Image (cartoon, coloured by chain):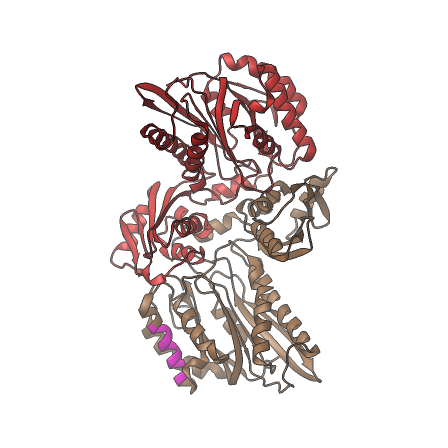
Chain colours: A brown, B red
Amino acid sequence: MKVQGFTFSTVEAAIKKPGRNDFALIFSNVPAVSAAVFTTSTVKAAPVLVSQEHIANGRAQALIVNSGNANACTGESGMQVARETTRLVAHELGIDSTAVQICSTGVIGVQMPMERIRTAIPALVTGLASGTLEDVAHAIMTTDTFPKMVTRSGSIDGIQYTIAGVAKGAGMIMPNMATMLSFIITDAAVEPLFLQEAFKNAVDQSFNVITVDGDMSTNDTCVIMANGMAENRIITKDTPAGSAFESLLNETLLSLAKQIVKDGEGATKFVEIRVRGAKNSADAKRTAMAIANSSLVKTAFFGQDANWGRIFAAVGYSGAEVDQSRLSLSFDDVCMAKNGIFAGGDAEVRGTEVLKQKEFTVSVDLGLGSGTASVYTSDLTHEYISINADYRS
Amino acid sequence: MKVQGFTFSTVEAAIKKPGRNDFALIFSNVPAVSAAVFTTSTVKAAPVLVSQEHIANGRAQALIVNSGNANACTGESGMQVARETTRLVAHELGIDSTAVQICSTGVIGVQMPMERIRTAIPALVTGLASGTLEDVAHAIMTTDTFPKMVTRSGSIDGIQYTIAGVAKGAGMIMPNMATMLSFIITDAAVEPLFLQEAFKNAVDQSFNVITVDGDMSTNDTCVIMANGMAENRIITKDTPAGSAFESLLNETLLSLAKQIVKDGEGATKFVEIRVRGAKNSADAKRTAMAIANSSLVKTAFFGQDANWGRIFAAVGYSGAEVDQSRLSLSFDDVCMAKNGIFAGGDAEVRGTEVLKQKEFTVSVDLGLGSGTASVYTSDLTHEYISINADYRS
């Protein structure tokens, strides 16, 4: 499946060290309707600040990204580098620099090697003839152990369109290799405001419900570009075509988000935390996040210990309204606790069997209302410590 | 230094397994003015609920505590066990059961062995003749590697009084061996409302500013008993004697809190996170806690990696008001970053030297206002994972 009108390129700019393609470009032959979601951290990397400015008009035609250096905590020089990079790329492509989105991922607090970036840009643009989206997925990897990519297609009035995306790992990765990045491209024609809204919702239901270590990066960015090259009737809100597009977009982002959790640093388990019966959906999410971020719970998952008490402890400090006598909990279909106490019987043995699997679901029912939430997380392992304790190298 | 009028006892009740004294009693010969601070978790252990009821009158004369079982998530049976235990102890001591505070620490979700508790109580009371506070410090240990104890003395009008305390580890310890417990006793005569206020403040400045893994337990409890046996003039608020007592109390609790961090599960570093220049003190604490609880920051401490970028990232998502161009950071007296960017020079080398120490201070200045906060934390190590991933045994 090809996303019409998009080309790709990657080159080696040796931003941190030589030996791999660490600089990538996504280009749309025509200006695309675009939307982006950025880190809510108050400490934002320079490329985030520049991309925020550029996306204000809801348009983008190119996306430039590097790994190896986050260009975060780099002050005014960092801003100059980010601006100059977009200017140079725009110049080579013959477009306006505000049509260029820019992202960086890597070490924090180190100035960017502007000379090497400047040198690499012409080759990067020339390379658009021959690159692939998969090349981009590779170029943005830091401690990721596999590239993350997905493609989905839909149709409207018999005209097929495609949504494709790439992402790189969450989990604040490697010795300050921060950042979750994801780039989504589609050849569908989509009404701009609807695209914005649908994209924001899709991010909320995917990248915002995964957690590896609870840390948020200075560089987190998700960008979508819809260039309309499929020449479909423009997709709008509150229509069957709009709903179908939304579903497809949600699927695309959720697939990428799950790939990120599966590749969480040192992770050996993929766990869905499903909360229901909360007073409201905010309480449900609060509860699910408290469980998903608890070091004790995550370490128990690694130890394959059916330790439901630690999960109830996390529920207790989540801040959600809780009546402990109404709490129940299951590992997959094994009920471990009901009405706040141990379910008895062979629950311990059967629950432990569930936790021996590589993937399982923890379901918590607060028994109070109709609020639900799902969050995806991994376990906390020796390997996580090893990856993150190593000196930045 | 002896705390007049208090006696102690410990016995083996084999609550989880035999082989150590796991059941302890602190008794005051006369009713004591008392105050307590309990976990704010909505999932509270049975002994917490019973102690909360009993402390309502501001009096206590005995404190009974067991390790090996938290009596948490045990429903109505757990409540009955906690109530019956206080009744039996009160009966043996010839006091009212509301004068008995009760605490438990250990595994969550397992019913208490009431028969063994019942059997142990008479010997526990008889033992009051010969026990010591240090015996109690030992009996309440779970994964703690050393008993935590402190004694301080002060005087008023030439009359000496003593404050002593014991505590057991934070860090949600061992496979669901939850709980931070601390018991403070003093022979000073203190005005009841002032004691409550001073104790709450002291807890806020000690146990509430330490963090090992960010998890809060279902059983956390701090109790103080002041029995007045020193026969001093009653210590009241807003007097020199009151201030002196407060200082001594703060010192006592802070010493115990620091001992807990030093004994944090698997910890190899003791780190003070000092924040200043925050908009207000709430922002300062928020910032310090975000840093102290970041898995990435704590893993960098373990790796002795002078990774100030990760600390700025944690500052960024703390929720505090931040202007990244005003941030600065030091490891001890080595300035690592100023005005949001790397300080340059040999900061990297010198900062790394600081992190090689067993104890150091991270100072962050937000450059916005006069809010300050200090938080104490440990590193996150392989040993933490090992301790917590082991099956409950």
> Was residue A83 drawn as part of the magenta stretch in this picture?
yes
Residue at 66% x, 27% y: name it.
Answer: B81
Question: In the rendering, at what x and y percent does residue B203 appear?
Answer: 44, 36
Q: Give the range drawn in magenta.
A: A80-91
Specify the quadrant of the image occupied by residue A260. bottom right
Q: In this view, does A53 lie above or below A40?
A: below
Specify the quadrant of the image occupied by residue A280. bottom right
| Viewer can see residue B52 | yes
* Residue nearest the observer in this picture, A299 or A8: A299
The C terminus of chain B sits in image quarter: top right
> Was residue A114 drawn as part of the magenta stretch in this picture?
no
The outermost residue toward the right is A345
Residue at 41% x, 55% y: name it.
Answer: B315
Question: In the rendering, at what x and y percent does residue A138 appear?
Answer: 50, 69
The outermost residue toward the left is B345
Principal SS element in the magenta part?
Answer: helix
Q: In this view, does B265 lie above or below B3?
A: below
Residue at 45% x, 21% y: name it.
Answer: B227
* Residue nearest the observer in this picture, B53 or B288: B53
The N terminus of chain B sits in image quarter: top left
